[in-house]
Image (cartoon, rainbow, N blue to C red):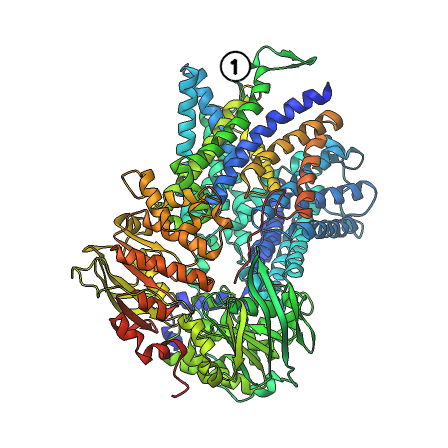
Amino acid sequence: MTTPTEQTPTTIPLRRRLGLMIGDQRTAYTFIIIATIGGLGLALNVDGYFNFVLAMAAMNILVGIGLNILLGLSGQVSFGHVGFFAIGAYATGVLMLNGTGFWVAFALASVVSAVVGLLLALPALRVSGPYLAMMTIAFAFIVEHGAIEWRALTGGANGLMGFPSPELFGYILSETDMCVFAIGLAGVALIFYQRLAHSTWGRAMRAVRDSEVAAQAIGLNPLVLKTASFVLSAALTGMAGAIFAPLNMFISPSSFPFFQSILFILGVVVGGAGTLWGPVFGALIVVLLPEFLSDFAEYRLLIFGGMLLGVLWAAPRGIVGTIAGWLSSENPAPAPGNTGALPRLLKIEQAQRLDVNGIGISFGGVKAAADVSFSAEPGRITSIIGPNGAGKTTVLNLIGGFYQPDTGEIRLGEVISGKSAFEIARAGISRTYQTTQLFEHMSVVENVMIAAKRGRLGTILGTANDAEDRLLAEQLLAFVGYTGPLARLAGNLPHVDKRLVEIARALATRPQVLLLDEPAAGLMREDKTQLATLLREIADLGMTVILVEHDMSLVMGISDHIVVLDAGEPLTQGTPAAVRDDPAVLRAYLGGTEYQGRPRAQAWSGEKLAVLTAHDLEAGYGAAPALEKVHVDVYPGEMVAVLGANGAGKSTMLRAMSGLHRPVRGSVLLNDQETARSPAHRIADAGMVLVPEARQVFPEMTLRDNILLGAWTRKDPVTEAEFEAITKRFPRIRDRMESKAGVLSGGEQQMLAIARGMIAKPKILLLDEPSLGLAPSMIGELYDVLADLRDEGVTVLIVDQMANLALTVADRGYVLESGRIAHAGAADELKNDPTIERAYLGHSGEK
Amino acid sequence: MLVLSAIITGLGLGAMYGLLALGFHITYVVSNTVNFSQGSSMMLGAVLGYTFAITLGWPMPLAVIAALLLCGVFGLAVERFLVRPFADRGSNAWLMATIAGGIVLDNVVMFTFGKEPRSFPSPLATDAVNLFGIGAYPLQLIIPVVGIVAAAIFSFLLRNTKYGKAMLAVVQRPEAARLMGIDTRLVIAGSFALSTMLAGVAGLLIAPLFNVSAGMGLVFGIKAFAAAILGGITSAWGVVLAGLLYGLVEALTTAFLGSTYTQIVAFSMIILALFIMPNGLFGSAGIKKV
């Protein structure tokens, strides 16, 4: 950020001044008018052929602007735009040949293109990616061959010609006049684009482009927005075609080859999708370059292909996008301070209670949530907690309408379950996400402003209530504690700010209910404290706050009511104090099954030359490291457990060691070999094998193939005896070697995953949450196997939520708290240490 | 008679679509990207085969092997330069990049190989044999067989060899595959090579029936992509079946309604099918997550 002293006019560098000027709306309009007048001047001063070329350029600009609405604003691709171009041309041609005047024909042709655009959008926009591309390709071919076949209307392959000259009040328009009209229209289209891009609708389209999920959560209907952009795009392209027919005086199917669609897109991409001037530059290049290089006419496509590649490699945002990016300098103005107007602006009228009655959902036969019921009161914070995989986020997704419940109902006054996500958002439920889902290519203030619309977008080019929304956005941003520039692109924000802006955006819909999914994940301790205060303040505004959060200190400190889930089912609910003292909760977290693990018969004493040493290990996802200064040693033949609350960094540690997540700093030594910067497959090759969280067996392969893939790194073949020896350990799966792994239960898959890890003959086996989501009897069996492995001298580093069990079978343990090692010691000492319990269930209640 | 002859033609075309579509499928399931220059890969196979066998007079088996290997090299280049740089930064610009790559290859071939289409003489396509009263070249009968056998061999190798299984592992659980020590980048590069080689097989097979030219791949590639989408790009046998279906629909439409209706009917079928089944005939949708 720049300091104010740099802003005296004399010291603003030219680049910055240019950048600020370009970002200004009025400047944009001025430039459009200047460019249009320039184009018109040129058109009036050149002769026949060059007029034609200029008119072609103007038409390509029109199409480019149309495509840019689709590609740049709403992020959809169409390879079928030549179809709309052809429809516009044929509609005009047919109407003019039947005695309709040019102007009426032009208007009707645009309408026809728009209607066809709508008809294509309805099926096409239900799909995305390659499927959408295919739909539009198919459309282009259907139009081309339809034109050949529908001879009565289109003249078949011979085409249409002999259009009467366009007239205006009896004055016959010359080629120059048509060129002037085309250029003028392109100018108007540019102004239209500029207004659209900065209108409420344009903002909403960009929001859908950046994150469809989050757009729905602020009440936007993606299908309507994408369809609107598709129809506008088709209409502009049809207009260009409508000029083409009388200008070219001849149209036939061969005027509209499929390849033209690719050239249209090429122009926009080379120029810069999503920029005002990109399509203009792109169209000029596509139309004018061949004119200048007429000696190389046959190399035209080669040059275009090479140019497109060059731009994609060197300037992915296109020529204009790259220049604009280089010039752009954001307005550093931060949000003005909190004026205390917020309670009035948020206007929370009598919020209603949210009732969740017996909701449940299964995915492929697995119950992710079952029979969950609770009520969340306005003005209070209701937290949903539970071990990993308990179904917390699933419950939020059900409330927010991202999933539809199989059973039960959700009421906010009226029944809201069964409605789609954007309808639920409009009904007054707003949310944030585990991984922030901001509209990354929009500014911070725009992110919040578009949410303030609650899905009501007004007229197509309108900017109604912008001032009011901006005030609300600024106040909200100040309220959540965001102090950075309002104009900064959300994608460029540091992690903490992303969280804050996402909360501000959720609040901007003035919701009755605010759902927060792990808002504290990745935040530093001081930021968490600030967040806790903020959440309390939000509840005090009268909102119903529902919080899913791993940080137990935070949860215990601010919640009014806590719902505990375990394996998708409600375990208990009550006040923080009641929940904390509930033995069932402690069991769910610490693993107090009836089963008691089998400790080592005699205390372990072995070689003191570590197999694995992590030193000063630091890793993270956001701004705050998830792991800091971690030091872990594992000696040959030893079994070491790593414990800690959810989110303490246990899994991150294993992922960092095994190369799935590159550590920020520190070293990992495997038999004195540095592995911290190696890719995962090299680390596996070196002899450190991770049995990952959630098993990750290969579901479509047989158990045998799964196990044999585990031996991928081995140079020596796996003998049948050896295979037998390994499978013998796992009687439960031993007889099912030829069935597919996907049909196994969770516990069986865990056995398989361990067998798959064992066969590699690793120097050390890392186990990530092996007991997660297993039935209690399976957990017993699993720990028996682990005790066997230990007794046979396999070196194991295990992370598990079943702290008591893990400490029973392990020799030593480390306790992680907020990414740091808080305790380390012999397993039986740690087991009797009361601080462990605190590490799991938080202690901020005592302050 | 008309029907039978149309079916033979349709199966032949369809098998070629199936081979190309299988190529689209492989790269899609392994790396979530699609090589839009598949049509050009097919053309490359035909042109190289022609150059080696006819222009240079190499023995046919050698020409075929050399052509396929070079197709594989082209696939590696596509992955390395047109896909990986974009996929690595999470951009989907590989879509335009592979299209551009196809344009460049088509044009380079046009300037080196020549603009005129050339016929690829083959003993299998000179004398028609009589089959139930209709004439067909032996090659026409062989093509669908070879196409289906190639798909079957591919499927067999995938399931029964170490490297095939490694590829399946990357498809099913990419992260776990890395933990097994499998170099996923290598597998992705390999999948592109395999996919362009399948396209090369199609090009070599079909060259004697159609003429060999730089532009032969474009429309063929598009139709094969249509078949891949129709089948649901996530299913290997789905895309092969859809390729055969697409070929049959084309040939039967041509036979009964005339060739100009072929594209209209076939592409309308695609739109209709996707309207009814957004994941294609045999494809499946993943569970959405946030």
Dot 1 corresponds to which residue? Answer: B122
Q: Chain of mark 1?
A: B
User: Is residue B23 positioned above or below A37 on the image?
Assistant: above
- Left or right? Give the position of A760 relative to A38: left
Q: Is residue A249 visible?
A: yes
The percent coordinates of residue A382 (x first, y second) are 54, 80
- Tell which residue pokes out farthest to the front in this image: A601
- Left or right? Give the position of A285 relative to A239: left
Given residues A325 and A431, the one toward you in this image is: A431
Answer with the quarter of the image where residue A201 lies. bottom right
Disc 1 residue crowd, few under 14, some 14–19, many 20+, Cα 10 Å: few
Q: Residue at x 52, y 17 (%)?
A: B120
Given residues A584 and A820, the one toward you in this image is: A584
The percent coordinates of residue B80 (x first, y second) are 39, 42
Given residues B152 and A495, the one toward you in this image is: B152
User: Is residue B109 positioned above or below A776 on the image?
Assistant: above
User: What amino acid is labelled 1 in the image?
Assistant: Ser
- Tell which residue pokes out farthest to the right in this image: A99
Q: Residue at x 47, y 56 (%)?
A: A746
Answer with the quarter of the image where residue B260 lies. top right
The percent coordinates of residue B117 (x first, y second) are 54, 22
Q: Is residue A45 visible?
A: no
Q: Residue at x 57, y 56 (%)?
A: A365
The N terminus of chain A is located in which quarter? bottom left
The C terminus of chain A is located in which quarter? bottom left
The percent coordinates of residue B224 (x first, y second) are 57, 35
Q: Secondary structure at mark 1?
A: loop
